[in-house]
Amino acid sequence: MISREQALAIARQWASAGRPGPEPDIELYEFDLGYVAWEVIPPPPPTDGPPAPPASTGFPSAVIDRETGEVSRWRSVPPDLVAEEYTQHRAAEGRFPPDVRHVLDKAGWRPGRDATSAVNHWMKRFADELAGLECSPAARAALIEFGGLQLPQFGGHGEPGGGYMSFIFPTIGGIVTDKARGFSEEFDNPVFPFGNNEDGPSELVIDAQGRVFMLHWADDFFVGPDIDTAIVKLIRGGPMTEASDLDWPDATDQGSREVAQ
C-alpha cells in the first residue's frame, strides 16, 4: 500500500520529469483508491503594469494508485471529479478486452459517459421518422452511453481502421427506419435504431432485451446478446449468425456461447 508520503514523492518525480530546476510544490487529494496530485504553480510577481496572463492553463492532474503506485495522467478538473472518474475507470477495467478498450478510449468513450442531451435532441429532431418505434430502457441506456461514437473495425493486420466503421446515433445526417420496422414485424421483436455500419451500408438496431442486430442488404444478422458483446463484435469484426437462424426464446444463451468460442 502506498502511503501519503510515498505518493507525494512519486508525484514530485512525475511533475519534475525531464524538467530542471527546484523540486515542484505538490498538492494531494486522498480518496479510496489512491491520491490525486497536481502541481501548485506560484503566482507571478507583482508588476507596476497591468497583470500578466498566467504562463499556462490546464495543468494536468495525476493519480497515484494506492495499491500499485502506478501513475496515470488525467485532465485538469477538480480533484474530487478526477477521483470519481478514476474510480469509474477502475470499475470498468474488466468490462472490455484491452484491444477493444483502446479503440473505445480513442473514440471518446469513458466509464459513466452520458450523452443524454445529444440523444434527446436527436430523438426530437427525428420524431416523425421514429414514430411507433419504442425506445426501450435497454436501447436508451445504450444510446446514452455510446451515442455519437465512431468505432473503427480491426483491419487485416489487427489494427483499427481497416474494416467497416460503425456510427452510433446520434450522427450527422438523416435516419431511415424502414428496415427496423420490417425486422420488428418479421420476427415479432420490436427494435429501435442504434446506429449505422459502413458494410452495405447497414443499420444497427437494439431490442428490449438489449440484443443488437445488423440489418444488412444481404440478410439480418445477430451481433450480440448485449451491448458490450455487440461493441466487441463491431470493433473486432468476424462472422455473425443470421437472425433467421436464431432460436428466439434462447437467443441470449446462443449468443453467449457463440462469443465464447
Image (cartoon, grey):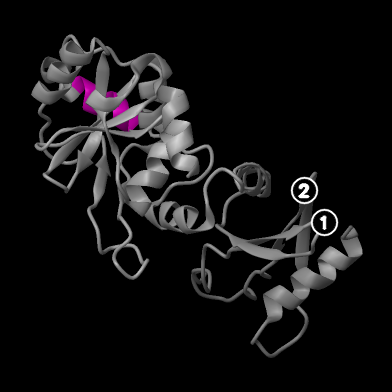
Horizontally, residue 193 falls left or right of residue 104, namely left
Depth check: give the residue in front, 2 or 132.
132
Closer to the N terminus: mark 1 or mark 2? 2
Q: Quadrant of the N terminus?
A: bottom right
* Prevalent SS, magenta region: helix
Determine which of the numbered discs, if any, sits on residue 75 in the image: none
Q: Is residue 12 above or below residue 219?
A: below
Depth check: give the residue in front, 67 or 203.
203
Q: Name the residue type under label 1.
A: Glu
Which residue is labeled 2 in the image?
A: 33
Dividing the picture into quadrants, the one containing residue 243 is top left
Whether residue 231 can be seen here: yes
Q: Name the residue type under label 2.
A: Leu
Which residue is labeled 1 in the image?
A: 67
Give residue 79's position: percent from left, percent from top.
67, 49
SS at badge 2: loop
Q: CA distance from mark 1 to mark 2?
A: 8 Å
Residue at image coords 16%, 41% = 172
SS at badge 1: loop
**Where are the magenta residues, as a range?**
117-124
Residue at image coords 53%, 74% = 55
Q: Are marks 1 and 2 in contact (CB under 8 Å)?
A: yes
Give residue 175's position: percent from left, percent from top.
12, 30
Horizontally, residue 252 falls left or right of residue 214, namely right
Q: Nearer the viewer, mark 1 or mark 2?
A: 1
Q: Within the magenta stretch, is there residue 4? A: no
Q: Is residue 14 above or below residue 18?
A: above
